[in-house]
Image: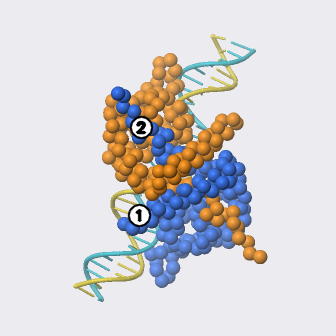
Chain colours: A blue, B orange, C yellow, D cyan
DNA sequence: CACAATTATATCGTGCACAATATATATTTG
DNA sequence: CAAATATATATTGTGCACGATATAATTGTG
């Protein structure tokens, strides 16, 4: 009787399509974001700042699921690009508050067309897309909540 | 009438949960894979080799959605770890054939428990998990096929 | 058969991503 | 109030990830 190792087959694992799909979708952002002088991760940071307003590096990291080691240099690059400002508040010099510059706020208008451009590249009906996002958010919500209970 | 920029809101975009979810799931692999001296991407390469057998770097790259720039150094590291061998066939010295070593084949047995360990960390019912994987595979299949038509 | 075009992989530069560690400020505690 | 502790960010080292380019072998064409 041959050993089949069913549990190790690619098609029986979530990780592979999740990882590959994420890479493929991120890849679609490259071209439209290039015109805005943003990388994908920088774009997500800008989305968060546009939606929630100024916040600290820590708050940003929690929302985007990134740690200081990734976020700190990324924010320096975004500052260099002129879209944000990094300032330490006088009452707590440990903190780093991320503020949108005029240029950063203005970029929002130019970024409006990005979601639509990428949506066109994702070959999925609207209802499937909603279902997919819903499942992903469910995983995300439960995983991060479980972590916080620790 | 205020401008709402609905299209730029995080909750209306697939990219964010997809990206964050992928990172969180990959993160769960870190600990179990550490015992095998594998990174996540290296693990995917091993899964492919275990399932499909020896193949060229190019074939591997196509399956895993990675290019030479990423794969070449990764494979060198895997060779250094002793799990694979990189050889150029005599009839075509451009090619690089990736072969599992004895140690690489033996690793399969030790890797058996990994999927289960990670499955436990993903807070989703079996049926939801299947639905999620199915949607992701659908996106992946359609996106890569569209690309090939170019 | 020479030489242009193609194929397959490698290298380089930039930017994530993260664990481990460092640093610097703020808060708590004896 | 000084020392210990906690908090918030920065730095370092390793490993992806990818576009652009380089290199080397093979194939196609005149």
| Residue at image point 64% right, 62% down | B12
Badge 2 is on which residue? Answer: A6
Same chain for marks 1 and 2? yes
Q: Residue at x 42, y 51 (%)?
A: B119
Residue that lies at the very extreme toward the front in this rendered image:
B127
Lower position in the chain sequence, tag 1 or tag 2: 2
Q: Position of residue C11 (x, y in %)?
A: 50, 38
Instruction: Kindly identify which chain the residue marked by label 2 belongs to.
Output: A
Please indicate, yes or no, whether residue A41 appears anywhere in the rendered image: no
How many numbered marks, from 0 up?
2
**Distance of mark 1 from mark 2, alpha carbons?**
30 Å
Q: Against A79, is C1 above or below?
A: above
Q: Position of residue A122 (x, y in %)?
A: 66, 48
Above/below status of B118 relative to B3: above
Name of the residue lying farthest toward the right: B1
Chain letter of mark 1 equals: A
In the rendered view of the protein, which quadrant contains the C terminus of chain B?
top right
Q: What is the quadrant of the N terminus of chain B in the image? A: bottom right
Q: Nearer the viewer, residue B142 or D28?
A: B142
Determine which quarter of the picture holds residue B19: bottom right
Question: Can you identify the residue that label 1 sits on?
Answer: A147
Q: Which mark is residue B101?
A: none
Within 10 Å of disc 1 (Cα), the crowding (few <14, some 14-19, many 20+) is few
Instruction: Report the mark closest to the observer, 1 or 2.
Output: 2
**Tag 1's secondary structure?**
helix
Residue in the foreground of this view, choosing between B85 and C3: B85
On the image, the x and y values in percent for residue B116 come to 38, 47
User: Horizontal and vertical percent for residue A123?
Assistant: 67, 46
Q: In the image, what residue occupies the spot 36% across and 28% down?
A: A2
* Viewer-nearest residue: B136 or B31: B136
Location of residue B137 (image quadrant):
top right
Q: Quadrant of residue C15?
A: bottom right
């Amino acid at each position: 009787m041959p050993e089949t190792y069913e549990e190790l087959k690619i098609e029986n694992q979530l990780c592979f399509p999740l990882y590959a799909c994420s890479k493929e979708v991120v890849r679609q952002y490259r071209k439209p974001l290039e015109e805005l002088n943003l990388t994908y991760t920088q774009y997500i940071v800008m989305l968060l700042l546009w939606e929630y307003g100024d916040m600290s590096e820590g708050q940003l990291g929690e929302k985007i699921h990134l740690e200081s080691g990734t976020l700190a240099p990324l924010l320096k690059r975004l500052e260099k690009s002129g879209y944000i400002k990094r300032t330490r508040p006088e009452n707590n010099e440990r903190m780093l508050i991320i503020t949108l510059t005029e240029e950063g706020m203005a970029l929002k208008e130019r970024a409006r067309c990005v979601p639509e451009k990428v949506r066109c590249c994702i070959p999925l009906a609207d209802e499937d897309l909603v279902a997919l996002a819903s499942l992903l958010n469910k995983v995300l919500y439960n995983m991060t909540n479980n972590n916080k209970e620790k």
